Amino acid sequence: MTFLIQQTLIYAVPLMIVALAGVFSERSGIINLALEGIMIFGAFMGVLFVNLAQTAGWFVEAKAAGNWLALQGFEILAMLVAAAMGALFSLLLSFASINLRADQTIGGTALNLMAPALVLFFIRMIANQNTLQMATGDSASWFMIKKSTLGFEKNADLGFLGNTLLNKVYLATYLCILIFVVLSIILYKTRFGLRLRSCGENPQAADSLGINVYKMRYAGVSISGALAGMGGFVYSLTTANCTSNGDVAGFGFLALAVMIFGNWKPLNIAAASLLFGLFKCIAAAYSSLDINGDGVYMLSQIGISSHLYRMLPYIITLLVLAFTSKGSRAPKAEGIPYDKGSR
Amino acid sequence: MNEANQYVIEMLHITKEFPGIKANDDITLQLKKGEIHALLGENGAGKSTLMSVLFGLYQPEAGEIRKDGKTVQINNPNDATALHIGMVHQHFKLVEVFTVLDNIILGAEDTKLGFLQKKQARKKVEELMNKYGLLVDLDAKVEDITVGMQQRTEILKMLYRDNEILIFDEPTAVLTPQEIDELMQIMKNLAKEGKSILFISHKLNEIMEVADRVTVLRKGKYVGTVNTKDTNKQELSNMMVGRPVQLEVVKAPAQPKEVVLHVEDMCVASKLHKRNAVNNVSFDVRAGEIVCIAGIDGNGQTEFVFGLTGLEPLSGGKIELCGEDISKSSVRQRGEYMSHIPEDRHKHGLVLDFTLEQNMVLQRYQEPDFQHGGFIRFDEVRKYAEGLIEKFDVRSGQGPITVARSMSGGNQQKAIIARELDRNRPLVVAVQPTRGLDVGAIEYIHSQLVAQRDEGKAILLVSLELDEVLSLSDRILVMYEGEIVGELDPKKTTAQELGLYMAGAKRSEKGGEQA
Amino acid sequence: MSFWKKESTQKVLASLISILIGLVVGAIVVLIVGIFNKSISLKGAWEGIRLIFIGILSTGRDAKGALTWGFNPASIGNMLFRATPLVMTGLSVALAFKTGLFNIGAPGQYLMGTLATLFIALSIPSGALPGWLIWLLAFLGGILAGMLWGAIPGLVKAFLNINEVLACIMTNWIAANLVTWAFDVSKLKNMVEGTKSGYIYKTTYGLVDGTYVDGAGVATTKLGLNKIFPGSQINAGILVAILLAVGVYILISKTTLGYELKACGANRHAARYAGIHDKRNIVLSMALSGGLAAAGASLYFLSGNTEFFWSTYQSLPAAGFNGIPVALLALNNPLGVIFSAIFMAMLDVVGLQLTNLTAYNEYITNVIIAVIVYLSAFSLAIRMLISGKRKKREKRAEDKAAPPAPPEDKAAGDKAESAKGGENA
């Protein structure tokens, strides 16, 4: 059970944060089909940062001294780098769709093609293979928080909650949840959020009230890029064995599905990503999943193929879209370039 | 008081050009404090452009704007707001999924550390609502309230920003007569409190009722400014059009013959709510008469036309056309007997990215005249299109190969009318055929419809314009909330009586049952 | 109207400029990497840049290690071979665009085509039917599978108004998993060649007495093309693809069906008003698109010299996505698709040359493709740059001949138009 919850969270958190990335962009009126590409780019930049910085003197010292705070700080730093690079990369989308009024779907597709191409090109140049490791050795264990990290005995029993939430977890998971909550509040309770949402619904109205639609859309897409870039890094940290290989296995598209499934609302998105995370977790580990802790691998005994579990999120999304298409409510002005001249 | 600061706003010699057109050419407008000043002109005369210049949405190429005698520069709506200028746009600028309160504060929010502080805002809005009699439910979402309420929200938006100069752009187009009366009262109240009002309209009745002075524009040029008490409707109308206008349509009495269209207990489901959008409608249209369905926008006319032409399925009742039951027929089958001039020429009437000739055969491309074995006969299409262009005087840059999008609204409408009337069907369904057109085009279209009638066609006209209804039709059916609430004879009724029916205040028992 | 002022000329010019900018960006990346990477140096960078522009004419290195140039039949033959699936997926995307649909589902349709084609070709025992009939059945079966798969997003778009882009993305990943699943439980996995267990048999393998024998299967006829381009993988598939492109061109521009599809694409509401079955046309368009994409897969794998890596649930075939740049570059003109597909295939070959001959790798060509797609997203802006002020002046003259609609009127109409693009989802 502990394992199930932890694994579900690990899959759900990148989905959640990237789906929120989609929300910020679409609520400002720009369809961000490029989430996948931005994730790939952010993941690469984060991994590259760790890869390059690991030889720095202060870092080697901190690591040798077992200073886990420094390591966690380093993880946060890498997340920030990935976020900044994601935001930078997303400027390509903002520029094309806001200034040049390009077709946002095609622009996003271009970024989705561009990211893996660039990333693979550089990985090949740097590592002479198709995968870039975050660090030499077992880098995953650097960043993972274990009982020992927090000063407990190796075999101390922290109770169910303690075991689940404090052992073999990543700081990034909790940080992302925190960011998710904070940004959701910003979206609904602040002046910035109100104005951003108005630009995605009725930019003409926003403009007539003196709100700079271009600026708000740039802000929306940039936040979106930062979140997706960070999500990409978290993905490669927690589920991709700390590597970058020009691929996030369709996570960005899945996040898009989560966003629609969640009807562009943060709370629903959180729930939807937990559901999807559960499927991902079952698909990845169903044969060794011991839900009740009684040594019986129930799911594998049912005999349903893991292929089905992998497919389920997409099938469910399609079905949900089919049944709720009337109730689902995309931001009204999304996908429509805003032209100051024509009103 | 000296001459200079008698005016709160002066727009002097304003010129604004768009690629290929001078929307405003040396226009001067002066607004006194506390007056209601009407801006009159036809569609495309430059009224909206002039107001957009005042509101900072466009920058003029020449001319100056003065506030209280001092020259000011208005670069964007923020500047306008800072000068206390506010505007209710023709198409409301509201965010539909936001509440009324959120819409009012948007762009002028009180915040603490970036967080919204709605309490004071609510208090201020409530005070304004009481002061001017503008009651609205602040917590309702805009998409759930009536058009009249939405307009009040727009007015509150201006008042919340302490605006002194209020611009109303065609505010009555979407309102019921009762709502119009209320609006007129609100405008008078506002003026009494010292607000200065600019009222854009092309409806002479309203201008005569509420405005103190009128400035008239024609084709982008300034015609003149007059006091309403020194003028009359005919004079204003002549100023607006530039020549004496025939306010009445010339036509001989109708000579109705056999029944062409028979509608019985027709119902169409609504997409917005659970009730029927069209409910138990029954009537006949005969050959050689123009029957008009009058009503305020949104009372089921659009759904009725969709049901009649096959764009939406019926939820009950039946339609007979030339003796045949067409209730379940497809659009194309119905098209064998009816032509349809649609309400929205851009959405339904034309494929804007197609050429004119492609649009001319929109329904007919599969007829043997225009195709052979599935392949289009391009030479025949060209010949046919050229014929229609000639016959109906459709003007365009490159003739049949002009892209429809590049044509003027009037010529787009002419092209649709040419296409539909040339199909020569026993029934012509014309929905708001003159919307957004200038007087010349309106006269032309009216005369074409009368000519069709005299040829023995049955004409079903759906219109929102009272003047058009009264002058063009031989019989009037009034539609209110999806039902026919009365049948009137245009020669015996008045605009006032018609208005009562349209507002649902009056209904004749036999209305709808006859046939 | 003179040649240079023609809209079509300017469109082609815009595409060419996009290509040029894409190549230049690729060259700049190569240059920068060369400057910062000591083992490459400027000399290596210069080699890379030359290969990017004219790599198709590279014939390798001479004894002294210098690059040599000339007609390389293997490269050109391989280019045409690789262009075959790209022509088909390009046609798929272009046809859907003409109907106003963005078929980003080509990868999934391509996969379903692969699945059906390989299953049919490898399941019919050799000798049970004549080889050409097995080939034809596998080809048509692939197309049918693609049509059915393409129809799904079409159906949900037409009847439930779900954005086809999203539906396509979902069906792509469902297809990727479905195909993996089907092959996983199949007996078509090639266990013979030791390390190659991740692959499905080539179609040249035939089922003889329950075991697969190389050479007993089917493959597309080469029609002597291999004599013209010795050492390459070329076969008659490229001719089939060109034929189909001409067919699609005629369908779109000459027939009533094409008129209907275009009308639905340009204005669905007006099409309905005119009595055209918009829903049927949307489904039909997506099904045809799916069939075309799948045909690309059929032609590619029926060549007999390509193997399919079956465990594809984490990735989608690039040939599917590359249909998008092919169509965009060709401005959705089916005949143009032939040329843009060949260009893209050329980049592919150039990429291999880069990998083989220099320290660079083939992914730089994907960067170039991405840049080209990015530019084509705002080709309108580029076109305006080309025509510049002359166009404005002309427009003014035209407008005087026929006074345009007042700006507010026109803007409202435009908004109504674009609003319907966004209303679904």
Image: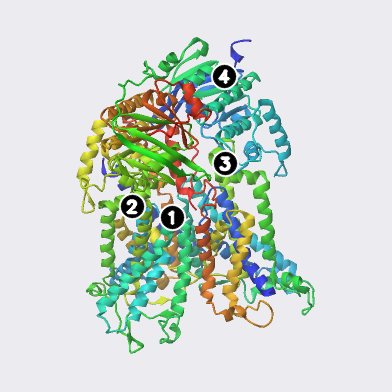
Q: Are the residues under marks 2 and 3 on the same chain?
A: no
Residue sitting nearer the eye, B261 or B437: B261
Crowd rating for badge 4 (residues with CA inside 10 Å; few <14, some 14–19, many 20+)? many
Which amino acid type is shown beneath numbered disc 1?
Phe
User: Which residue is the site of mark 2?
Assistant: C261
Secondary structure, mark 1, is: helix
Total numbered labels placed on residues in the image: 4
Distance between the alpha carbons at the discs numbered 2 and 3: 35 Å
Distance between the alpha carbons at the discs numbered 2 and 1: 17 Å
Q: Residue furthest bottom?
A: C209
Looking at the image, residue A142 sits to the left or right of residue B288; the answer is: right
Mark in front: 2 vs 3:
3
Q: Chain of mark 4?
A: B
Q: Are the residues under marks 4 and 2 on the same chain?
A: no
User: Which residue is the site of mark 1?
Assistant: C159
User: Which residue is the site of mark 3?
Assistant: B143
Crowd rating for badge 3 (residues with CA inside 10 Å; few <14, some 14–19, many 20+)? some
Locate residue C219, reporting x and y percent.
29, 77
